Image (tube, rainbow, N blue to C red):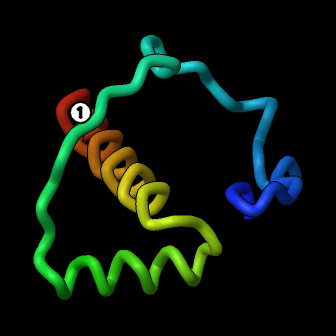
Amino acid sequence: MFDEGEDVSAYIDFDNGVMVEGSKETRRVNVDFPNWMVVDLDLEADRLAINRQAVIKMLVDEGLRARRELRAG
């Protein structure tokens, strides 16, 4: 939806959002995925109406947050 220029503000929790330090900076990385994983990523992207890159970022973010919580105990 966002990529198509649609208003997605109804899906954002502005009251509880946080700015992550360094989040304005980006770095390009290359990752090779097996075909089955790309197919699954594309299915999830279609389901969420977002692009593949957004799905990858979302899943990596979820995984890193979960691991951080486990370490914090």
Q: At 33% from the left edge and 84% from the top edge, which residue is drawn? A: 40
Count of residue discs: 1
User: In which quadrant is the C terminus drawn?
Assistant: top left
* Left or right, 72 with reference to 2: left
Identify the residue at the far top of this view.
21
Residue 32 in percent (x, y) is at: 12, 62
User: Tag 1's secondary structure?
Assistant: loop
Q: From the top left corner, tell me how far across and down residue 46 is, in percent.
A: 55, 82
- Give how far across and how far down residue 21 sits, in percent: 46, 12
| Mark 1: amino acid | Gly
Q: Does residue 69 sit above or below 36 in this rendering?
A: above
Residue 60 lies, in percent from the top left, at 31, 50
Towards the viewer: 15 or 33: 33
Is residue 34 depicted above or below 7 in this figure?
below
46 sits to left or right of 52: right
Depicted 33 relative to depicted 11: above or below: below
Q: Residue at x 80, y 33 (%)?
A: 14
Residue at label 1? 73
The residue positioned 41% from the left and 80% from the top of the image is 42
In this orientation, which residue lies closer to the viewer: 71 or 2?
2
Q: Looking at this view, is 68 or 50 the one in front? A: 50
Q: Residues within 10 Å of mark 1 (few under 14, many from 20)?
A: few
43 vs 64: above or below: below
The quadrant of the picture occupied by the N terminus is bottom right
Lateral position of residue 27 relative to residue 20, left or right: left
Residue 31 falls in which quadrant of the image?
bottom left
